[in-house]
Amino acid sequence: MRLSAALVRIAGIEADFFRDADYVAYSIVLDKTESGFPKPIKGNWPGLPWDRVDSDYQSAPRRWEARGLVRFMVIFGTLSSMFDLATFAVLWWVFGVSHAPTVFQTGWFVEGLLTQLLAVLVLRARVAPWRGARCSPVVVLTASAVGVIGLLLPVTPLAHGLSMTAPPGWYLAWLLLVGAGYGLAMHLVKRLYLRQHRDWL
């Protein structure tokens, strides 16, 4: 039988086998196909662990193309770098931390961490984050927890050992501004990208 794709899930005790628009759930422990299969992928396949996938994206197996992945990385990586450069400029000229490299590095670390967490939430689906398959609570809670840890780390006793120095308190205003701008810009670029290329990874 020709397979389109296969995926091992649930700590290696179950596998999903895909062929065209259908899939089969196979129990590795019991060494047999689960009852009721094959089933159509669309509307039945649960998606990746701890998150959901838009139903229209599950209509058929998809192959990742290296060419599309490189194009995706160049476009969205460039966008991310633009906001990093804006943060460098603000830290250097607005906050005047050219004499304090650890403050500069810490400010960049916090901005980079928060914007990349935001990128995960914005880029996980073709549509806006608040439409389509909603983000799993586990993903939202994990991203939120990592973001809070990243924000608080420079003011904890661990900061000295990590060579971190907290930026000025009003740097939070820049983080809010850059976060809102980055999220909006990423969503708009995503829409233009899909209009031009029509494939999403």
Image: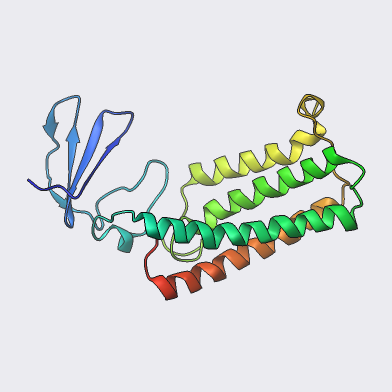
Quadrant assignment, res 33: top left
Q: Residue at x 26, y 50 (%)?
A: 45
Q: Quadrant of residue 24?
A: top left
For residue 83, above or below residue 7: below
Expressed as whole percent of the image width and height from the top left, the position of residue 89 reads: 81, 58
Residue 166 in view, yes or no: no
Instruction: Name the quarter where the C terminus is drawn.
Output: bottom left
Residue 191, percent from left and from top: 49, 71
Asked whether, in this view, residue 32 is left or right of residue 48, the answer is: left
- Which one is in front, 55 or 12? 12
Task: Report the number of numbered marks.
Answer: 0
Q: Residue at x 54, y 47 (%)?
A: 140
The structure residue drawn at horizontal position 24% and vertical position 55%, both measured from the top left corner, is 61
Above/below status of 49 relative to 127? above
Which x, y percent locates residue 99?
92, 43
At x 24%, y 58%, the residue is 42
Residue 30 in view, yes or no: yes
- Residue 109 occupies which quadrant of the picture? top right
Left or right of residue 4, residue 112 in this image = right
Relative image position of residue 49 (x, y in whole percent)? 38, 41
Q: Quadrant of the N terminus?
A: top left
Please indicate whether residue 181 sits to the left or right of residue 100 in the image.
left
Considering every residue shown, the one lying at the far left of the view is 1
Q: What scheme was used to colour the molecule?
A: rainbow
Instruction: Report the side of 150 relative to 55 (left or right).
Output: right
